[in-house]
Image (spheres, rainbow, N blue to C red):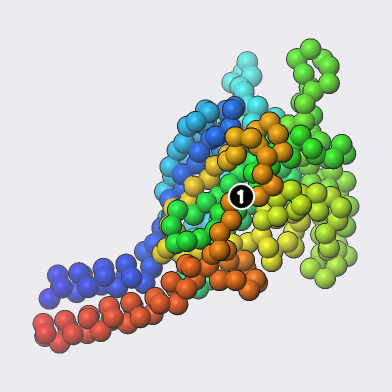
Amino acid sequence: MSTMMIFFSAIFVSLSGVAAAGRFTVANNCQYTVWPGVLSGGGEEMLATTGFELQRGESRTLDAPAGWSGRFWGRTLCAADSAGKFACVTGDCGSGAVECSGKGAAPPATLAEFTLGGGGGMDFYDVSLVDGYNVPMLVAPQGGGCNATGCAADLNARCPADLRVVAASHDGGGGESVACKSACDAFGSPQYCCSGAYGSPDTCKPTSYSEFFKNACPRAYSYAYDDATSTFTCAATAAADYLITFCPNTSSQKTSGSSSPATNSTVAYVGGGETSGATRCMARMPVAVGFALSLLKTCLLLFR
């Protein structure tokens, strides 16, 4: 009987999604090398690596445990000095090594954020420009009919002058814009940082600076309370795999490119009115779980 119990318990776990975990494939479509960084949420298990190098056209896959939360970002213009200390011009995590080892990105940096198996058995994910922008990024669930999100546009080329991060050229002349600060990072005022008297959704509103990011990338977070159009969900059992692509549009590497990633009719915003195909699938999950329970009860009666 113990063998049958294990067998049908496995069926139940599989159908209910309790044991669901995630897999992230990180791909570099840029014409330059990117060093992705990975930071797990507080108390969460670290993934197999916390930082690595991706040359043009390369990709790497990382497995995440069930319930994992954390973020990915890209570091650019990285090198080690004569003493072997590793550092990057944008997205640096300050570890002094390729591995970030629990350290996060210094702004400005484009962030991909995830919570796997959150409330209602849903994955939550977003691409955030709240800490600024340094590289185009797209997050695409691989299954479940769930929607992609991200920022495919090259914002460095058209960043407002007072938000630009400019890398000095080798000849000492004017350098190129390599990242775009948030207004909070640039000016530090509560109005832009959603802090102090502006520390609530009622008092912190979009500004001309956050609207620059929002107009270019409508699905990405542009300021702290930009939840309604920027947080996406997918059934944890439907899309356990996510593809994170740097420079998803070839044209975005040197020109403005597309202002938003490809869309489909199954988008689901948190707080929005539309529901994804994955959400509809979740509505049918109790039927499958009920079937598994009935089957398990029958077997228990037969093997008493």
Mark yes or no: residue 261 visible: yes
Give the x, y percent position of residue 153.
Answer: 68, 42
For residue 45, above or below residue 28: below
Mark yes or no: residue 118 visible: no
At mark 1, the secondary structure is loop
Q: Quadrant of the C terminus?
A: bottom left
Q: Is residue 139 left or right of residue 13?
A: right
Viewer-proximal residue, 187 or 103?
187
In percent of the image, x 38 and y 68: which residue is there?
18
The image quadrant that residue 147 belongs to is bottom right
* Marker count (numbered): 1
Viewer-proximal residue, 248 or 179?
248
Q: Residues within 10 Å of mark 1 (few under 14, many from 20)?
A: many
Viewer-proximal residue, 160 or 171?
160
Report which residue position mark 1 lands on: 261
In percent of the image, x 65 and y 72: which residue is there?
271
For residue 45, above or below residue 60: below
For residue 40, above or below residue 181: below
Give the residue type that dot 1 points to: Pro
Report the residue that reaches farthest toward the top. Answer: 171
Give the x, y percent position of residue 260.
Answer: 66, 50
Give the x, y percent position of residue 15.
Answer: 33, 70
In percent of the image, x 59 and y 27: which residue is there?
32
Give the x, y percent position of residue 198.
Answer: 85, 63
In percent of the image, x 66 and y 60: which residue is there?
230
Q: Quadrant of the N terminus?
A: bottom left
